[in-house]
């Protein structure tokens, strides 16, 4: 049987353990690897690791996303974390955390998260309750970092833990459901805002036309103008403001959350409640005892009720 020899990949046989020849000393190889970015920083800069861009931020300046800044050599979040207080009255607005005199009930039911092994903290059951949002909470990039805010509280006698993380800026997107029966444009057609492509027409759902807006290809993958218009468009839609969109080869649509869409200058006044199957589920009880058979004709799903 042939004896196997150890080799280091260079074609030279290595001495076996216990052999009577001297052991060759390893030859120092030159290090061709570049120095890590964070070791090549200027003294007045800090590296932001909140996303893969890894901005190197000078003192008193903000990063490319305008969300993180260098303050006194420390990386800080520009916007404070947003805490909201639950209100019973629907007309109540948000309470500013910095304005302590605005409402004495600001001190709500937030309890700091206790690390494992630490003494238990008292659970406050204040009313109205205060809960932490992900706005201003910062991210967990890279993924091995824990969530920035892990908050425990007591809700109606039940222990509750709220974990919030802010998403990486460039991955924001929206799916817009437009309640209209009218054809707006072919699937995959570009959707434009102020002349820039900000999304596309996607498959219809529940009888409504659907638009996919935003995303990394439009925010960071195109021109700076395209990215800024895309972010501004999503910001306005999220704040329930009207946005004018144009679909290539299709209609011009004015979209605003909570209001009927305006298609080619004409506001929509009617909208089917759903496909034939949805109609069956909502009105089956009303049909019982009135007719022997009902056929709900729909171009998506036709519903049939037989007694």
Image (tube, grey):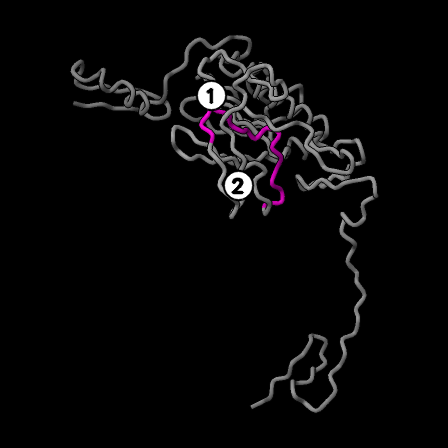
Which residue is depicted at the point 75% across and 31% down? 62
40, above or below 108, in the image? below
What segment carries the magenta color? 124-143
Q: Is residue 127 magenta?
A: yes
Q: Is residue 193 magenta?
A: no
| Res. 253 visible in picture | no
Q: Position of residue 200 (x, y in %)?
A: 56, 28
Which numbered marker is on residue 114?
2
Residue carrying label 1:
128
Foreground: 183 or 205? Answer: 205
Mark 2 falls on what kind of element? loop
Q: Position of residue 120 (x, y in %)?
A: 48, 41
Q: Quadrant of residue 160?
A: top left
Foreground: 26 or 172? Answer: 26
Q: Position of residue 231 (x, y in %)?
A: 64, 25
Foreground: 304 or 205? Answer: 205
Q: Quadrant of residue 70?
A: top right
Which residue is depicted at the point 56% across and 14% down? 254
Predominant secondary structure, magenta span: loop
Tag count: 2
Q: Quick one: quadrant of the C terminus?
A: top left
Q: Quick one: quadrant of the N terminus?
A: bottom right
Q: Is residue 225 left or right of residue 104?
A: right
Mark 1 falls on what kind of element? loop
Q: Is residue 182 left or right of residue 294?
A: right
Among numbered discs 1 and 2, the one appearing first in the sequence: 2
């Amino acid at each position: 049987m042939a004896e196997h020899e150890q080799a280091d990949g260079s074609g030279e046989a290595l001495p076996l353990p216990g052999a009577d020849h001297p052991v060759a000393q390893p030859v120092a190889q030159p290090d061709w690897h570049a120095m890590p970015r964070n070791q090549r920083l200027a003294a007045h800069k800090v590296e932001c690791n909140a996303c893969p861009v890894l901005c190197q931020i000078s003192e008193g300046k903000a990063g490319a996303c305008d969300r993180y800044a260098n303050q006194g050599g420390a990386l800080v979040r520009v916007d404070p974390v947003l805490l909201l207080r639950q209100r019973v009255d629907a007309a109540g607005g948000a309470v500013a955390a910095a304005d302590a005199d605005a409402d004495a009930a600001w001190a709500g039911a937030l309890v700091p998260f206790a690390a494992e092994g630490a003494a238990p903290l008292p659970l406050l059951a204040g009313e109205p309750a205060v809960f932490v949002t992900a706005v201003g909470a910062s991210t967990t990039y890279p993924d091995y970092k824990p969530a920035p805010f892990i908050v425990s509280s007591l809700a109606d006698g039940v222990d509750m833990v709220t974990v919030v993380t802010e998403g990486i800026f460039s991955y924001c997107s929206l799916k817009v459901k437009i309640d209209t029966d009218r054809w707006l444009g072919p699937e995959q057609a570009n959707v434009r805002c102020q002349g820039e492509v900000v999304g596309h027409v996607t498959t219809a759902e529940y009888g409504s036309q659907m638009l996919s807006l935003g995303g990394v290809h439009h925010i960071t993958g195109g021109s700076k103008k395209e990215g800024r218009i895309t972010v501004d468009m999503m910001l306005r839609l999220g704040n329930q403001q009207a946005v004018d969109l144009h679909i290539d080869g299709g209609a011009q649509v004015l979209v605003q959350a909570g209001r009927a869409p305006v298609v080619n200058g004409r506001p929509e006044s009617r909208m089917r409640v759903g496909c034939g199957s949805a109609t069956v589920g909502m009105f089956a009880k009303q049909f019982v005892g009135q007719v022997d058979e009902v056929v709900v004709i729909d171009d998506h799903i036709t519903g049939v009720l037989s007694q």
